[in-house]
Amino acid sequence: MGLSYGGPHDESTVRFLYDTYRAPPRELALYGNKPETIRMMVETQVEDMDPNAVLNVLRSADSDRSSHLIFRIEPSDCRFRPCKTIASSFAFNFLWNRHLRSQISDTAHFYDLFCEGGPDMASSAEWIFGFRMHDLLTQGYPMSLFPIGRTRSTSTKFDVYNNYTNFHNERNAEHFQLAESQEETLGEGIKLKVNQYYRPTAPNFPSIDSVLLIHPANSSPILLMFQFTRRKDEYDAKEDGLNQVDGLRVPRGTRKYLVVVTPSGGEPQIRSPKGRFENEHVLVYHHPVQRRTLFPLA
């Protein structure tokens, strides 16, 4: 587009604006040297909306004043009916905190809408799932963890049990009643406190969405490392995030559990991390979440 290479704007600034806001070419050309202007435009448009306005925009295939900084129009399988999705995680974060977080029934409606919208809307459904889990895990959440086991002794694959009601799976599950906790910012090398919920604000911890240090009665401490996903294909537990978490300061003897959190039904197969994390006994668990748990009374 000539916006940075041989053009009027710094390449790193243009890249930041696109990565953060998915800013379209017009806005990049006009405000490529004014990143705060684009941020203000996103915030102003979010303030002017409410759940009904969000729904009306999503149902319409037409462009409007929220395009394309909050909502993005994309082609769909039907060429006569383009689809709309939320433009960026930044825009969704503002919509969530301003309009959706306290409106569980509205949030459930949008979640269903995005889930049914196909791959173009998958990222928006993923964001809602993650934000709801962040909220639930700080609210005295009851959690059942099902261990991921090898299919056979020589296999490198790990399975998700798809029947949690049978005796074998239930017997091996671990159950916790999490305490209510405050959300804190997760930073590199910090000393974790028991029952403080830590969430990274920047992608410093790849694949790790949050961590929680708990200390059950008559047990050693446990560091729960959460990964949220709605993917139904094979899921690899990435080592990059575990490398970052490994630098956090925790009590001596702390056990480390990697907990893959997914909606119940259609769970992916999960492959445990290899190498030193397997040798150091980082245990991998699956926590399926039913819709009525995600959206109670909705």
Image (cartoon, rainbow, N blue to C red):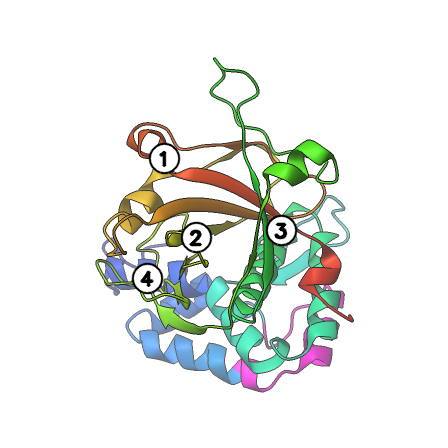
Horizontal and vertical percent position of residue 225: 42, 51
Q: Nearer the viewer, mark 2 or mark 4?
A: 2
Q: Nearer the viewer, mark 3 or mark 2?
A: 2
Residue designated by label 2: 224
Q: Which element type, helix, strand or loop, lies under badge 1? A: loop
Label 1 – label 4 distance at C-alpha: 38 Å
Q: Nearer the N terminus, badge 2 or badge 4?
A: 4
Q: Nearer the N terminus, badge 3 or badge 1?
A: 3
- Rendered image: mark on residue 265: none
**Looking at this view, is 89 or 173 the one in front?**
173
Horizontal and vertical percent position of residue 64: 64, 74
Residue designated by label 3: 122
Q: Is residue 259 left or right of residue 294?
A: left
Residue 69 visible, this angle: no
Q: Amino acid at mark 3?
A: Ala
Q: Residue at x 75, y 52 (%)?
A: 116
Do the residues under discs 1 and 4 have CB atoms within 8 angstroms?
no
- Residue 169 part of the magenta segment: no
Label 3 – label 2 distance at C-alpha: 26 Å
Residue designated by label 1: 281
- Rendered image: mark on residue 16: 4
